[in-house]
Image (cartoon, rainbow, N blue to C red):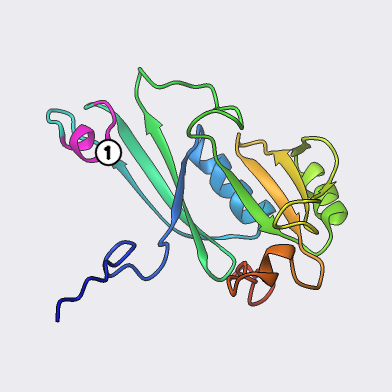
C-alpha cells in the first residue's frame, strides 16, 4: 500500500526560533526592548562582513560590502527577537509604513490596554488613534491599539477578555496564551 499523505510544513520543524528586525541603532533598540518591554538581552555578536568577497551578499541578500552587528533579546518565556544594525552606503533609511511590504509589528497581549498605553506613551511611544474593540470578525471581542515606538517599530497591544472568541466555536485552534507575566530573567 502506498502512502499518499503529503506532509504540510517544514520537515522536522518544531517551533519558531526567533523573529528579526533591522534597526537604525542597535543600542537604542536593545535598550527599548530591555528597559521598556522587559526583555532580557541574551548576547551580541559582530561586526560581520566580508571586505573582499561575496559571502554576505550570497547568504543574506545584502550588498557585498554591508556589515552588521546583532543582538538577541528574549521577550517573555517563548519569544526571541534578533535585532540587526546593518551598515551600507546604499541602505534605505526610511522606515516602511505600516501598510508597506516588509512592514512589521510586535503584538503584546496585555490585561489593560489603557494602562499599557499610558506606560508606553510615558516612554516615548505614540498611539495610532484610540483602542479599538473588534466586532464582526472571527476574533471579535479583542481590543487592539497600535503605537509607534521611538526605535521605529510598531507595537500592537492586544487585550483578550475572558471567554471564547467567535472563531473558537468552529475549530479546536486557539490563540497562544501566555504561561505567566514576563519577567526580566
Magenta segment range? Answer: 55-63
Q: Is residue 18 magenta?
A: no
Nearest the viewer among 85 and 115 is: 115
Nearest the viewer among 59 and 86 is: 59
Nearest the viewer among 96 and 45 is: 96
Give the SS element for disc 1. helix
Quadrant housing the N terminus = bottom left
Image location of residue 183, percent across then percent down: 65, 70
Q: Identify which residue is drawn at 53% across, 22% down.
A: 94
Quadrant housing the C terminus = bottom right
In the depicted structure, whether residue 102 falls above or below residue 74: above
Residue lying at the far bottom of the rendered structure = 1
Q: Identify which residue is drawn at 46% across, 52% down.
A: 19
In the depicted structure, whether residue 159 falls above or below residue 163: above
Q: Which residue is mark 1?
A: 60
Image location of residue 41, percent across then percent down: 51, 59
Image location of residue 44, percent across then percent down: 40, 52
Residue lying at the far top of the rendered structure = 90
Image location of residue 133, percent across then percent down: 83, 50
Q: Is residue 122 left or right of residue 64?
A: right
Amino acid at each position: 500500500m502506498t502512502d499518499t499523505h503529503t506532509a504540510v510544513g517544514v520537515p522536522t520543524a518544531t517551533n519558531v526560533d526567533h523573529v528579526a528586525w533591522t534597526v537604525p541603532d542597535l543600542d537604542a533598540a536593545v535598550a527599548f526592548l530591555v528597559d521598556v518591554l522587559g526583555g532580557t538581552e541574551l548576547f551580541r555578536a559582530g561586526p560581520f562582513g566580508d571586505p573582499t568577497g561575496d559571502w554576505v551578499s550570497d547568504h543574506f541578500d545584502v550588498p557585498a560590502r554591508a556589515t552588521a552587528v546583532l543582538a538577541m533579546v528574549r521577550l517573555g518565556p517563548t519569544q526571541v527577537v534578533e535585532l540587526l544594525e546593518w551598515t551600507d552606503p546604499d541602505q534605505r533609511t526610511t522606515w516602511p509604513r505600516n501598510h508597506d511590504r516588509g512592514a512589521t509589528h510586535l503584538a503584546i497581549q496585555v490585561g489593560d490596554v489603557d494602562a499599557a498605553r499610558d506606560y508606553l506613551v510615558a516612554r516615548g511611544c505614540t498611539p495610532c488613534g484610540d483602542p479599538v474593540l473588534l466586532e464582526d470578525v472571527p476574533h471579535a471581542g479583542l481590543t487592539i491599539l497600535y503605537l509607534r515606538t521611538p526605535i521605529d517599530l510598531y507595537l500592537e497591544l492586544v487585550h483578550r477578555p475572558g471567554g471564547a472568541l467567535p472563531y473558537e466555536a468552529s475549530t479546536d485552534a486557539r490563540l497562544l496564551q501566555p504561561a505567566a507575566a514576563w519577567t526580566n530573567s
